[in-house]
Image: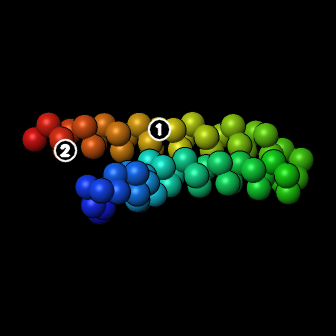
Amino acid sequence: MGTPDKPILSALSRLFYSRKFLLMILDAAISLVLHYYGGADTEFIIAAIQPVVVALIVAISIEDAAAKRK
């Protein structure tokens, strides 16, 4: 990933390739697009999508924790 003399770049590159981070960015982008360019019932759609994304992030976190325990 990175070199010991550049720990911040290593941490940033790990962050940008994290599935949890990418899901969070995707959720924020979809919510913003729906909020500003959506039609009549966009708040309902946003409220319906976000718990699903949060559940995915939690599932990935549990999977990562289980993989580290092995």
Q: Residue furthest right?
A: 40
Name the element at disc 1: helix
**13 sits left or right of 43 in the view:** left
The amino acid marked with disc number 1 is: Ala
Q: Locate the C terminus by quadrant.
A: top left
Q: CA distance from mark 2 to mark 1?
A: 18 Å
Residue 52: % across, % down? 54, 42
Quarter of the rendering occupied by the N terminus: bottom left
Tag 1 residue:
55
Find disc 2 in the rendering and name its residue.
67
Q: How is the image coloured?
A: rainbow
Q: Residue at x 76, y 39 (%)?
A: 44
Q: Position of residue 51 (x, y in %)?
A: 57, 36
Residue at position x 50%, y 55% from top? Answer: 22
Q: Can you say whether 22 is above or below 57 in the image? A: below
Bin the neighbour count of mark 2 within 10 Å (Cα to Cα): few under 14, some 14-19, many 20 and up.
few
Residues packed near mark 1 inside 10 Å, few (<14), some (14 to 19) or many (20 plus): few
> Which of 9/51 is in front?
9
The mark lying in front, picked from 2 and 1, is 2
Could you say where residue 34 lies in the image, as x and y percent from the top left?
A: 78, 52
What's the residue type where badge 2 is placed? Ala
The residue sitting at the left extreme is 70
Q: Nearer the viewer, residue 51 or 18?
A: 18
SS class of the residue under badge 2? Answer: helix
The part of the image, by quadrant, that contains residue 60 is top left
> In the image, 7: left or right of 27?
left
